[in-house]
Amino acid sequence: ALQQAGYMAQRRRMSHTTGWGKDFASRVKDNRISGAAAENIAEGRFDLEKLFDIWVHSPGHRRNMLDPRFTRFGLAYVRDGGDSKLRYWSLVLGK
């Protein structure tokens, strides 16, 4: 999660794919996560409470967070270097 949040902050854009061609599946495999996995990402000037409010009211993000297959998670944000209030968030869910 921290790797992806850092990548997005560095590039100043939200994406599940890194600039060096690593998609979510590749990143999960490289980090030794096997089986089902999912990722929620966000960009904005909001705190953790607002972030989860946004995700809970988004069907796809909510589905990821409530999927009973996921027993582990990583959550991170990295601030934008030019705007300290702008955060890039990543939530990675797995088994």
Image (cartoon, helix red, strand yellow):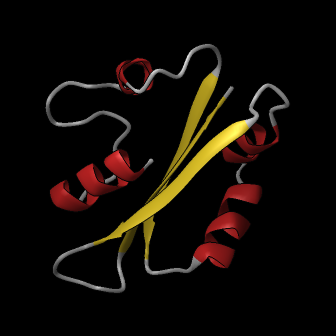
- 52 to the left or right of 9: right
x 34%, y 43%: residue: 15
Measured from the top left, where is residue 3 in percent x and y?
33, 47
Q: In which quadrant of the rendered image does the C terminus lie?
A: top right
Residue 28 placement, left or right of 91: left
The residue lying at 55 percent from left, 55 percent from top is: 75
Q: How many labels does the image show?
A: 0
Residue sitting nearer the eye, 93 or 49: 93
Does 89 appear above or below 30?
A: below
Residue at the far top: name it: 35
Residue 84, x across and y down, in percent? 29, 85
Q: Residue furthest front?
A: 32
In which quarter of the view is residue 60 placed? Answer: top right
Q: Residue at x 74, y 31 (%)?
A: 70
Is residue 49 placed above or below 30 in the rendered structure? below
Residue 52 drawn at (x, y percent): 69, 65
91 vs 17, left or right, is right
Is residue 62 shown above or below 25? below
